[in-house]
């Protein structure tokens, strides 16, 4: 009984930190199904525009935090470590809640994963937020190391690529988790979160080898995640690898 209670407490804590909503926390809403094989051009445009706008907003945020850190560094009354603390908290916000800068619906939920057919080797739902918490910590550490290596600058190639990677991940979440487009999620997870993670890790490694090594764990996990997304797509009908037009259907 105690073990079960501890597991429940852990699950609630992890889901709260990562902003994941479980099935019983979901509000009742309409769902949608694909009734044709027609490409949803509007959805493609929305995804592209939403991603571009999120990247633009986060780059502006990088500019703002850079100016704030300059003020902190120039303030002799503040301890030298204070700007590092502020930077770490900033990267923690980006790593855990980058979706607050997105115009797309980026609700984190286990509902889609719970309802689809999954391979036998798929991890239980709780594993995902726990792993992403670990990755978030690794992202913070590696990004702070890069920031220090770049003389406390934020508008630099490694960190710009980092926010692009986060935005691509948020867009994929919209496609897979929120809209349940299992086909479109396959190429997007490969060309978006997975490929951008490889690029960011390589650039971090060139900037600071320790930062690159720390971040490389995210590449391993995203490789597993991409394989899982592909297998889920195969097991659930292998719909076309592009967003289909959806018809709203009352639950």
Image (cartoon, grey):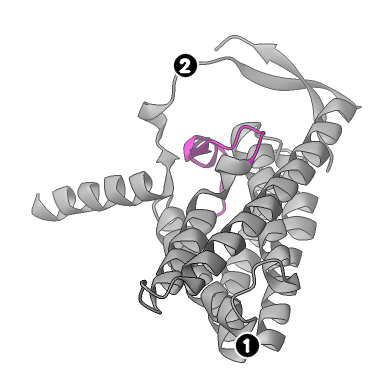
**Which range is magenta?**
102-120
Q: Main secondary structure of the magenta part?
A: loop
Q: Nearer the viewer, residue 95 or 239?
A: 95
Q: Report the side of 197 relative to 218 (left or right).
A: right
- Looking at marks 2 and 1 on the same chain, the residue that comes earlier in the sequence is marked by 2
Q: Is residue 74 placed above or below 132 in the rendered structure?
A: below
Q: Quadrant of residue 35?
A: top right
Instruction: Kindly identify which residue carries mark 2.
Output: 28
Q: Residue 109 in the image: x percent, y percent? A: 48, 38
Quadrant where the C terminus sits is top right
Which label number is shown at residue 130?
none
Instruction: Kindly identify which residue carries mark 1.
Output: 208
Q: Residue 126 in the image: x percent, y percent? A: 39, 52
Name the residue furthest left.
2
State the CA–CA distance, disc 2 to disc 1. Answer: 47 Å
Describe the element under mark 2 as helix, strand or loop: loop
Q: Please identify, in this view, whether the residue under mark 2 or under mark 1 is nearer the observer.
A: 1
Q: Is residue 246 covered in magenta?
A: no
The residue drawn where x is 37% and y is 46% is 15
Q: Residue 79 in the image: x percent, y percent? A: 35, 76
Q: Nearer the viewer, residue 234 or 70?
A: 70
Q: Residues within 10 Å of mark 2 (few under 14, many from 20)?
A: few
Q: Is residue 35 placed above or below 45 in the rendered structure?
A: above
């Amino acid at each position: 009984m105690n073990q079960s209670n501890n597991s429940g407490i852990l699950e609630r804590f992890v889901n709260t930190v990562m902003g994941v909503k479980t099935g019983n926390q979901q509000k009742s809403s309409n769902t949608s199904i694909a009734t044709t094989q027609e490409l949803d051009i509007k959805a493609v445009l929305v995804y592209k525009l939403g991603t571009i706008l999120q990247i633009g907003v986060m780059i502006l945020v990088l500019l703002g935090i850079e100016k704030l850190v300059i003020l902190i560094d120039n303030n002799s009354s503040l301890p030298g470590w204070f700007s590092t603390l502020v930077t770490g908290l900033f990267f923690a916000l980006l790593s855990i809640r980058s979706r607050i800068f997105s115009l797309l619906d980026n609700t984190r939920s286990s509902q889609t994963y719970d309802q689809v057919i999954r391979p036998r080797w798929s991890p239980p739902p709780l594993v995902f937020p726990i792993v992403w918490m670990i990755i978030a910590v690794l992202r913070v550490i590696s990004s702070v190391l890069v920031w220090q290596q770049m003389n406390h600058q934020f508008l630099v190639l490694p960190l710009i690529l980092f926010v692009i990677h986060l935005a691509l991940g948020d867009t994929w979440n919209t496609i897979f988790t929120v809209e349940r487009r299992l086909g479109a999620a396959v190429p997007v997870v490969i060309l978006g979160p997975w490929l951008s993670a490889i690029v960011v890790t390589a650039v971090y490694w060139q900037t600071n080898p320790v930062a690159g090594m720390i971040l490389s764990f995210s590449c391993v996990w995203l490789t597993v995640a991409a394989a899982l997304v592909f297998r889920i797509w195969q097991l659930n009908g292998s719909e076309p690898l592009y967003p289909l037009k959806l018809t709203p259907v009352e639950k």
